[in-house]
Image (cartoon, rainbow, N blue to C red):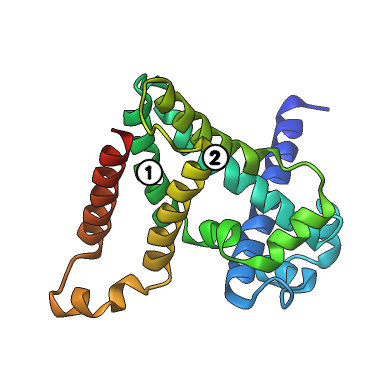
Amino acid sequence: MDMGVAERKVRHKEDLKKEILDAAKSLFSEKGFESTSIRAIAEKIEYSPATIYLYYKDKNEIVHALHREGFKLLVSHFEVLNNVSHPFERLKGMGRAYIQFALQNPDIYRLLFMMEEPLKHVANCFEEWDEGDRAFDILSKTVAECQTLGFFNGFEPIQLSFVIWSTMHGLCTLRNTGHLAHVGVARANNLDLDQLMTATFETFVIVLEKLKG
């Protein structure tokens, strides 16, 4: 087979898989996991359901692929900071990267961290979930590196990592769901939401500065 033809076939296959995942992500976010069918995904991209079954055997495989790609994207945001040698500076950078990921990819963020049904299917159908674990491992290892420098004495690293993640998740969720914009003080003072997010994060950084000793 001509290499040009082979390459076009591979590219078409990858493009179609991306179309399927993008359509599924949009429908899961709009209608919910249980209410989204393979047929609905197929109709959104104007293909037959049989075409989708060529690439994914069922809806569970689709949602697993979305989780895998979503966490890879999150990890790529963190890996940009690999050249930051000081762990506390890297930790602060990870917080900013997490906010950037959440705001730039709201549908993916919702699928990964806010929708319960897809997560149940991923957990029930697939024993290994390396991408999801890796994202948290990067955080917890960075916290542990901070402790080797004498920071965060008296804190258990995994528990502190959960506190940090919970705070970042809460802030991003409030923003992505629109709740932040409806806080009375924000409306009354006509606060810019980007500035409010930044100021809140910087306040959290000050808290971490005090905790690290």
Question: Is the N terminus in the top left, top right, bottom left or bottom right quadrant?
Answer: top right
Q: Can you see residue 61? A: no
- Residue 147 or 172: which is nearer the viewer? 147
Residue at (82% x, 54% y) in the render: 56
Residue farthest to the left, as pictured: 189
* Label drawn at residue 95: 1
Q: Position of residue 29 (x, y in %)?
A: 58, 69
Q: Image quadrant of residue 85?
A: top left
> Left or right: 46 with respect to 95?
right
Q: Position of residue 79 (x, y in %)?
A: 47, 30
What residue is disc 2 on? 158
Q: Position of residue 149 (x, y in %)?
A: 37, 20
Residue at (23% x, 80% y) in the render: 184
- Residue 28 or 143: which is nearer the viewer? 143
Q: Earlier in the sequence, mark 2 or mark 1?
A: 1
Residue at (56% x, 64% y) in the render: 114
Q: Image quadrant of residue 94?
A: top left
Question: Is the C terminus in the top left, top right, bottom left or bottom right quadrant?
Answer: top left
Residue at (72% x, 43% y) in the render: 129
- Residue 9 or 109: which is nearer the viewer? 109
Q: Can you see residue 44? A: yes
Using the image, determine if residue 201 lies above or below residue 196: above
State how far apart marks 2 and 1 are (Cα).
Answer: 16 Å
Residue type of the residue flagged with mark 2: Ile
